[in-house]
Image (cartoon, grey):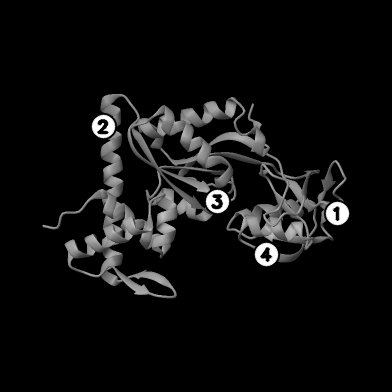
Amino acid sequence: MPRLTLRQLEYLVAVGETGSIARAADRLNVSSPSISSAINQLEEELAISLFVRQHAQGLSLTQGGQRVLEKARQVLNDAREIANIAADISGTARGPLAVGCLLTFAQLVLPRLRRGFETGFPDVRIAQKELNQAEIFNALQRSEIDIALTYDMDIPTDLNFIGLVRLNPFALLHAGHELATRTSVSIDDLADLPMILLDLPISTDYFLSLFTASSRQPRIVELTRDMAVMRSMVGNAFGYSIANVRLQSNTSPDGNQLVCVPITGPVRSLRMGLLTTHGAEKSRTVSAFIDYAQAQARAGAFRAIGGETLS
């Protein structure tokens, strides 16, 4: 019987989902050689090839590798459930916790929240994933993650949202923009101007809904799926954009000054919070993470990104 480890299976899933050892290493915060060695050992133990190595295109799963990947996910989920049972019996939060986070604000929220939680609960080991909204729904429903930080956008009925803070929309402008000196702007002020749209599943629908509420249509000139690229496009005067999360710096990645101007009028704010499957809070580890995040919200931990504590 092959001798497999949970760590090997974790590495397999990460490589299978990202299609790259380097990207899997970034996701898991381990070295690429460690992952490469684990995959090689796994293939030797199983006596099959799990991946096809393509020099220019990374790694793709073989048919056998796809079947093993699906079973590996199931084994890792079962291992988390065993850890949850142990945590309930011992009365303490412990074991692995898979946390997803909306990629548009993951860099601003997740590392600090994770560090504080792991300091307070040293027996918990967090694995994080940065995902778009549709991917978060899918990962929760497939039990690939235990909990996620995201917005209250189009939440499916089989998932449970716990609000933490409210985030209002603002226009992101380059410092020389004609509206940059205003204290606020309306959708009518923006509609006829060139817009750089952050083009992500469900998030895009929210941005466009701000215009629909005012019976206007935006003049979209560029689409990007990358927050940093969007900021640099704005900084270089290709247009304005709309966001809900304020970064710590008013400088674009390539060094241009940016200005955030609140949008007033009939615009919907978003709530940032925690998303779980129904009943997930019965896990002592998930419950501890929820309690910690709520305490951080009440203490004003999200104020720097524009978060208003919910009443």
136 vs 4, left or right, is right
Callout 2: few (<14), some (14-19), or many (20+) C-alpha neighbours within 10 Å?
A: some
Q: Nearer the viewer, mark 3 or mark 2?
A: 3
Q: Nearer the viewer, mark 2 or mark 1?
A: 1
Location of mark 2 (residue): 86
- Residue 156 is at least partly visible in this image: no
Location of mark 1 (residue): 176
Q: Earlier in the sequence, mark 3 or mark 2?
A: 2
Q: Earlier in the sequence, mark 4 or mark 3?
A: 3
Q: What whole-number distance in Å separates the C-alpha atoms at marks 4 and 2?
A: 47 Å
Where does residue 289 sit, x and y in percent of width and height?
44, 32
Location of mark 4 (residue): 223
Q: What whole-number distance in Å separates the C-alpha atoms at marks 3 and 1?
A: 29 Å
Q: What whole-number distance in Å separates the C-alpha atoms at marks 4 and 1?
A: 22 Å
Check the image and report above or below for 310 versus 263.
above
Q: Tell me which residue sits at (27%, 54%) in the image.
A: 8
Q: Amino acid at mark 3?
A: Leu
- Residue 56 is at least partly visible in this image: yes
